Amino acid sequence: MSQENLDVVRSLFDAVARRDTATVLALYDAEVEWDNTRGPLQGLIERKIYRGYEGVRHWWREYREPWESVWGEVEDLIDAGDHVVSVQTSHARGRASGVVVDLAHFAAVWTIREGKIVRVALFTTRAEAPRSRGPAGVGGAGERSAIPSPWTARLRCRICRKPPARLT
């Protein structure tokens, strides 16, 4: 099931990039749990657990509200058995200020059952994600050299000349 789980998460990111809400929601279980209690967006999004389709919609509305635009890159997808760990960086341009902010190298643990996402847990860093090392040490030290270490999520302002492909 591990390859299938990776494919579900890849399909989700592809649908988000296309802004295909119907496909995005079809990939989630109707009772999905979106856990933002340890998420990286302190002060911007309420640190709580969101439930169901409406909960996912609510989280995304809160996430997008202060931004004119949001885009990002998935840096890694790690097979962790019944789970997939994604490591990503998001960028956003402030709606009022125009300032670009980066949220680098945060992680999400995706739980998939019967081809549907049943739980998402967000973490400030990959190291905080409990299944980030995968089975038998997948993703351990030295195996993911493309991803910077130590894992630190940071908000920083910069002037962005050419944004990467939009994710959301």
Image (cartoon, rainbow, N blue to C red):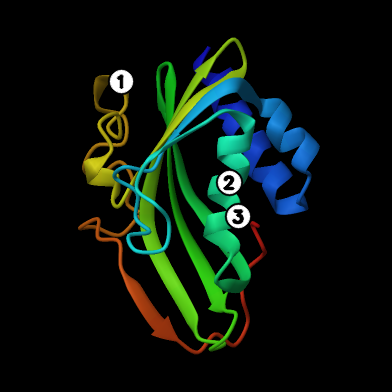
State the residue in front, 56 or 105.
Answer: 56
| 164 lies above or below 129 | below
Report the disc number at residue 159.
none
- Check disc 2 and report its element: helix, strand or loop: helix
**Camera-nearest label, 1 or 2:** 2
Q: Earlier in the sequence, mark 1 or mark 2?
A: 2
> Where is residue 48 drawn, in percent x and y?
37, 41
| 153 lies above or below 141 | below
Q: From mark 1 to mark 3, how far is it between C-alphas?
A: 34 Å
Q: Amino acid at mark 2?
A: His
Q: Looking at the image, which residue is at 34% across and 55% down?
A: 40
**Camera-nearest label, 1 or 3:** 3
Q: Amino acid at mark 1?
A: Pro
* Residue where numbered disc 2 is placed: 58
Q: Amino acid at mark 3?
A: Arg
- Check disc 3 and report its element: helix, strand or loop: helix
* Residue where numbered disc 3 is placed: 61
- Estimate how packed mark 1 is, as few (under 14), some (14 to 19) or many (20 or more) residues with alpha carbons within 10 Å: some
Left/right of residue 39 with respect to residue 18 in the rendered view = left
State the residue in front, 95 or 116.
Answer: 95
Discs 1, 2 touching: Cβ within 8 Å: no
> Where is residue 131 drawn, in percent x and y?
29, 29
- Check disc 1 and report its element: helix, strand or loop: helix
Discs 2, 3 touching: Cβ within 8 Å: yes
> Where is residue 112 drawn, in percent x and y?
51, 19
* Residue where numbered disc 1 is placed: 135
- Estimate how packed mark 2 is, as few (under 14), some (14 to 19) or many (20 or more) residues with alpha carbons within 10 Å: some
